[in-house]
Amino acid sequence: MRTSTLGLVAGLLLALAATTGGLTGFLLALVLGGLGYALGLWRDGEIDPTDPASFRPRGRTRA
């Protein structure tokens, strides 16, 4: 399992533990899951928060 996937699972489990449901709980689960996924990508070395070019899609080139 990649670190980014593990981060996503950890973020979702933390959100589940912190909430009891409802719209607020759903939105919190999305935010914490996305944060966990982003931290995992950073730890895998796939994104660099200091380099804006790392957030662009890799398959496209700018004209």
Image (cartoon, rainbow, N blue to C red):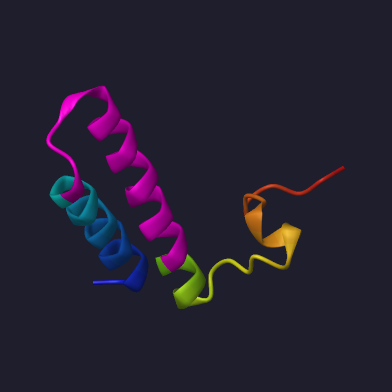
Q: How many marks?
A: 0
Q: Which residues are magenta?
A: 18-39
Say if 45 sits above or below 54 in the image: below
Which of the 4 quarters of the picture holds residue 44? bottom left
Q: Residue 37: x, y in percent? A: 39, 58
- Report the front residue among 33 and 18: 18
Specify whether 11 is left or right of 21.
right
Say if 46 sits above or below 59 in the image: below
- Report the front residue among 23 and 41: 23
Specify whether 12 is left or right of 4.
left
Q: Residue at x 16, y 46 (%)?
A: 16
Specify whether 24 is left or right of 20.
right
Is 31 one of the magenta-colored residues?
A: yes
Q: Residue at x 69, y 47 (%)?
A: 60
Which secondary structure class fits the magenta region best?
helix
Q: Residue 17: x, y in percent? A: 14, 51
Specify whether 59 is left or right of 2.
right
- Report the front residue among 36 and 63: 36
> Which residue reaches farthest right?
63
Say if 22 sits above or below 12 in the image: above
Which of the 4 quarters of the picture holds residue 35? bottom left
Say if 30 sits above or below 34 in the image: above
Q: Residue 54: x, y in percent? A: 66, 61
Quadrant of the snapshot with the N terminus: bottom left
Q: Residue 13: x, y in percent? A: 18, 54
